[in-house]
Image (cartoon, rainbow, N blue to C red):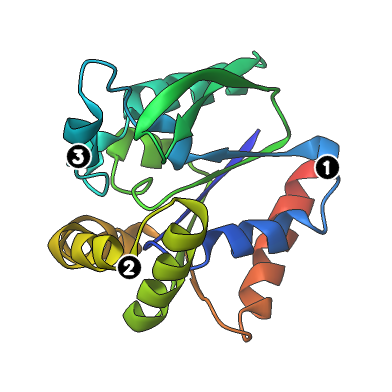
Amino acid sequence: MLIIGIAGGTGSGKTTVVQQIINELPETEVGVISQDSYYRENHNLSFEERALINFDHPRAIDFELLVKHLTALKKGEIIEQPVYSFVTHNRTDDSIITHPRKVMIVEGILILANPELREMFDVKIFVHADSDERLIRRLKRDIAERGRDMEEVLNRYQTTLKPMHQQFIEPTKAYADIIIPNDKYNTVAIDVVRAVINQRIT
């Protein structure tokens, strides 16, 4: 199994890059795991307390479970990915049955920040985007998809997103095998990644 880690700041366009990679590959041979599914469950906290959690800090992620699940997939086992709700800031009772694939793509802002997880990746990718561009994308997404208002998003960006990006996310660029600039000129980098994958699965 080839495991690819795709990291980058919030709104950098990781999901777009994942789509560009898997679009050209057989659906039955590629699986995707999102770090967003692995936020820790917080059933012991009230909604107000959960809303105050710093979700951009590595301790908000259940890396132990993610590593355990990837290890199981490598052994050919089926896993149940958790489902996380950004509306309630908590894990739901649902899960996603995930089968092993020849290629597993793991994407998320902090996936290169965890040494154990980093060690599992055969290819490490960092998607780079301008900070203004990332803020605009985050603003649009959180208002449209996560029920936030502009003031809340901007406040969170200034108090947690930006400092956490500088402290934990941007430095992980140093671990990347490939850095993809998220603009219309990234086709060469995408083609390189696809070539590596095709070599492994054919």
- Name the mark nearer the viewer: 1 or 2: 2
Name the residue tied to disc 3.
Answer: 53
Residue beneath label 2, please? 150
Of pointers 3 and 1, the one earlier in the residue sequence: 1
Q: Name the residue rendered at 34%, 30% in the picture.
A: 63
Residue type, label 3 = Ile
Q: Nearer the viewer, mark 2 or mark 3?
A: 2
Q: Secondary structure at mark 2?
A: helix
Q: Amino acid at mark 2?
A: Met
Q: What's the residue type where badge 1 is placed?
A: Glu
Drawn side of residue 85 relative to residue 59, left or right? right
Measured as percent of width and height from the top left, residue 155 is found at 19, 64
Q: Does the image show residue 118?
A: yes
- Indicate which disc, 2 or 3, sits on the residue closer to the N terminus: 3
Query: Which residue corresponds to the image point at 31% horizontal and 34% vertical from the top-left?
Result: 61
Q: Percent x, y for residue 30?
A: 74, 41
Residue occupied by mark 1 = 27
Taking 1 as reference, is 121 above or below it? below
Above or below, 30 against 144 in this view is: above
Q: Decide which of tag 1 and tag 2 comes sooner along the chain.
A: 1
